[in-house]
Amino acid sequence: MAELRGALIGCGFFAVNQMHAWRDIEGALIIAICDRDPERLQIVGDQFGISRRYTDAAAMFAGETLDFVDIATTVGSHRPLVELAASHRVPVICQKPFAPSLADAKAMVAACAAAGVPLMVHENFRWQSPIQAVRAVLDSGEIGTPFFGRISFRSAYDVFSGQPYLATGKRFIIEDLGIHILDIARFLLGDVSSLTARTARINPAIAGEDVATMLMDHESGATSVVDCSYATKLAVEPFPETLIEIDGSDGTLRLARGYQLTVTGKSGTTARDISPPLLPWASRPWHNIQESVLAIQRHWVDCLVGSKEPATSGADNLKTFALVEAAYAGAASREPVRMDELLK
């Protein structure tokens, strides 16, 4: 099978993880990179041996024959870049946040659909092996039908040192982190019918919210609480772990700090360590996110080769993106938000 020829647009902080993962995946090869900053372009190009380098995305599309493009830029540039890729009929992976607004996200999905090309959002948290292990327990039926879940990410980790732009936006934790945790809630408990949210800004040095709590009604009948914080100082820093509690009709599961999974169900109680693998290029504590990058990009290649729709397709991700919009709207109004109204 011939290797898929891909390009990366955006050579910033997180894109290095994507480049490492592409190098590990059979069946795909990054042949060109693009960034408006010549210094970042040189650093990534030299590190990964990519000689075809562009400072203009339009020039790259005109000069290369591509099977896909991986867009790893900041959110404001996503729509024009996705639409540019669609105009060249090149399949697209787009980093999250997917778009500045739900209207932009819908337009991007529509552009790729009209061009007949796949679009996947790099919504990678659900691809972390501990989260996949939780999903496998639910699929096994061991705890019966879930009726309650709590998906929690609470930390005081300094995310601003590596990504200083996060401190300047009026939207912060829901848009940057909460979107992942909300997507996990959808992945585990199904689509959402209504959402209630509260937010707070504890750190006075940032512009956006750094604490968010969301209560959701799922179409399955389950209720979930999604809580996110970058203002929670603990004796042991859990970053970047997502902690999960799910109660079912026949038992419970708990994913606790240190990737300890305890399941009490039809077969009794089991406890096991489901720590993610430490890839050769990964580093603690980021390794759970880094291994999920490899997993989601491998899924993308499998979908392209097999002509299947990605699990986190643009169309599917509209439902996760709508949860973000609902959370901000609900926090502002302090009223529940119905999801069917947003997704019309």
Image (spheres, grey):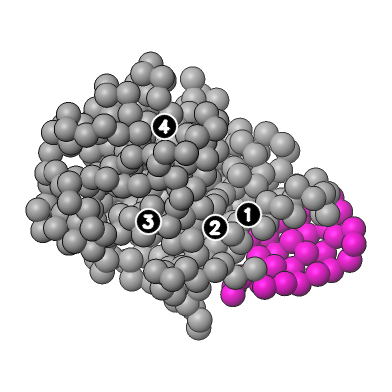
Q: Secondary structure at mark 2?
A: loop
Q: Which residue is mark 4?
A: 119
**From which residue to which does the magenta span run?**
244-273
Asked if labels 1 and 3 touch by Cβ distance under 8 angstroms, the answer is: no
Separation of marks 1 and 2 at Cα, in angstroms: 6 Å
How packed is label 1: few (under 14 Cα within 10 Å), some, or many (20 or more)? some
Give coordinates of residue 185: x percent, y percent: 59, 47
Q: Which residue is mark 3?
A: 23
Separation of marks 2 and 3 at Cα, in angstroms: 19 Å
Q: Secondary structure at mark 4?
A: strand
Q: Secondary structure at mark 3?
A: helix
> Of 279 and 164, which appears nearest the observer?
279
Q: Residue at x 32, y 41 (%)?
A: 6
Separation of marks 3 and 4 at Cα, in angstroms: 21 Å
Compared with 334, 277 (above or below) is below
Compared with 280, 222 (above or below) is above
